[in-house]
């Protein structure tokens, strides 16, 4: 293929949702990625449409505890020490975005984006035949101590003020909803509107199939070069030489160099996310549950229990941390001591922005290149919202006002 109307760089859930939406709008679309579609973080996540996840990673509480969090290798938020010199500028931005005023603004902006997430997924799942993979049973935060429960009240009240539905459960109520859990002293916060997928990889697979059926073409290649020339955008790489009228950068954690080639310096860094899985015919829980002090989720999925989470800052090249995997296993066994060795382990990469807001909108050099990445922990949640915004930009329509804090011009 030598030319295309629109090239989408990245075949994760964001890129696939964009390509699918543009194809339904009658656009000629090609998706370019060196890896199989949906094989990265779009597969390995917690599988939750997390309407409640409006807090940015950076908050005043995190800022107060940042030194201990980053340098305690057992912390849910940690840093690979070898990456510190490279990460220092990003960490300074992160610290500024964790101040009270900035953190509140970021939370409000995330909440505005989240408002369209579940309606967007309802529509998308209907279009791609994915309704059977959706479970409308909510999600829980677990508090292992009364101190943890008390310490969460201000946060939960803030979420309620931004429209999040949350119910507090005592120990007996929690046990009635999740009898497989051991007793939890502090009870739980229940988010009833959250929806989870029994298999996020299968859902993304159906999205890929629907995109192909709508006419989207796929090219297996890595984009190493992006240049503008004579009203076209030239994409090059090993075995790749393609011209497109418009390009959408949706390469997740791999988007930074492409953004720079388009003329935008974007402070994108990488969160290294882990999961471990135990095969079981019937998972021990009926909905995702997060022990908040441990920073991971128990995720009941088709034929397995996935334990996913924690944040490790440190790039895409280093091997998986055996210590981080061991901490996930240790945390899972604190609740289910009889779990044996996990059946599989996984490391993937999330694009992380200092303000926890995605980058969506035209590049400084012109709207022939559009940005659509940086969603952090909520890429799966925000895929339909992002796709609609990109489709509106391509069509010359005014996108939802929630796009304003996400524009790349904010940097």
Image: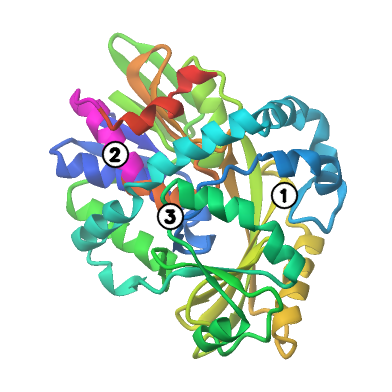
Q: Nearer the viewer, residue 374 or 10?
A: 374
The mark tally for this picture is 3
Q: Which residues are magenta?
A: 385-398
Q: Is residue 25 above or below residue 365?
A: below
**Looking at the image, can residue 219 be seen?**
no
Q: Is residue 132 magenta?
A: no
Residue under label 3:
51
Residue at point 67%, 86% (across, down): 182
- Left/right placement of residue 392 relative to residue 272 reads left
Q: Residues within 10 Å of mark 1 (few under 14, many from 20)?
A: many
Q: Residues within 10 Å of mark 3 (few under 14, many from 20)?
A: many
Q: Nearer the viewer, residue 91 or 199?
A: 91
In the image, farthest residue toward the left: 26
Place of residue 404 in the rendered image (x, y in percent of width and height, measured from the top left)? 39, 25
Residue 279, by quadrant, is bottom right
Quote the CA–CA distance across marks 3 and 2: 31 Å
> Going from the N terminus, do you reach mark 3 or mark 2 first?
2
Place of residue 1 in the rendered image (x, y in percent of width and height, measured from the top left)? 28, 35
Residue at point 54%, 83% (across, down): 173
Residue under label 1:
312
Q: Secondary structure at mark 1?
A: strand
Q: Is residue 290 above or below residue 287?
A: above
Residue at point 69%, 73% (across, down): 186
> Going from the N terminus, do you reach mark 2 or mark 1 first?
2
């Amino acid at each position: 293929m030598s030319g295309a109307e629109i090239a989408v760089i990245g075949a994760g859930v964001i890129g696939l949702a964009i390509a699918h939406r543009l194809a339904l709008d009658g656009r000629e679309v090609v998706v370019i990625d060196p890896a199989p579609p949906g094989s990265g973080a779009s597969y390995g996540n917690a599988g939750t449409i997390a309407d409640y996840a409006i807090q940015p990673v950076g908050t005043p509480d995190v800022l107060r505890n940042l030194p201990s969090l980053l340098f305690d290798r057992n912390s849910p938020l940690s840093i690979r020490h070898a990456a510190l010199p490279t990460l220092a500028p990003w960490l300074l931005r992160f610290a500024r975005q964790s101040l009270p005023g900035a953190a509140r603004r970021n939370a409000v902006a995330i909440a505005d984006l989240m408002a369209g997430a579940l309606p967007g997924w309802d529509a998308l799942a209907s279009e791609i035949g994915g309704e059977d993979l959706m479970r409308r049973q909510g999600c829980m935060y677990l508090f292992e101590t009364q101190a943890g429960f008390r310490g969460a009240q201000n946060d939960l009240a803030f979420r309620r003020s931004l429209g999040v539905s949350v119910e507090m459960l005592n120990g007996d109520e929690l046990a009635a909803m999740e009898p497989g859990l051991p007793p939890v002293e502090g009870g739980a916060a229940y988010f009833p509107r959250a929806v989870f997928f029994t298999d996020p990889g299968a859902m993304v697979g159906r999205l890929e199939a629907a995109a192909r059926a709508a006419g989207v073409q796929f090219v297996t290649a890595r984009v190493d070069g992006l240049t503008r020339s004579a009203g076209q955008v030239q994409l090059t790489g090993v075995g790749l030489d393609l011209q497109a009228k418009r390009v959408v950068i949706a390469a997740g954690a791999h988007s930074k160099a492409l953004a720079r080639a388009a003329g935008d310096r974007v402070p994108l860094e990488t969160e290294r996310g882990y999961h471990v899985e135990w095969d079981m015919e019937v998972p021990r829980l009926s909905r995702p549950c997060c022990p908040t002090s441990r920073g991971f989720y128990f995720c009941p999925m088709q034929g397995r229990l996935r334990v996913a989470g924690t944040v490790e800052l440190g790039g895409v090249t280093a091997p998986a941390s055996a210590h981080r995997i061991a901490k996930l296993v240790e945390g899972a066994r604190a609740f289910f001591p009889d779990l044996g060795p996990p059946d599989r382990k996984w490391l993937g990469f999330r694009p992380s922005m200092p303000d926890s807001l995605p980058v969506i909108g035209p590049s400084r050099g012109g709207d022939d290149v559009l940005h659509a990445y940086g969603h952090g922990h909520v890429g799966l949640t925000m895929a339909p919202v992002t796709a609609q915004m990109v489709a509106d930009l391509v069509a010359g329509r005014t996108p939802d006002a929630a796009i304003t804090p996400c524009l790349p011009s904010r940097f």
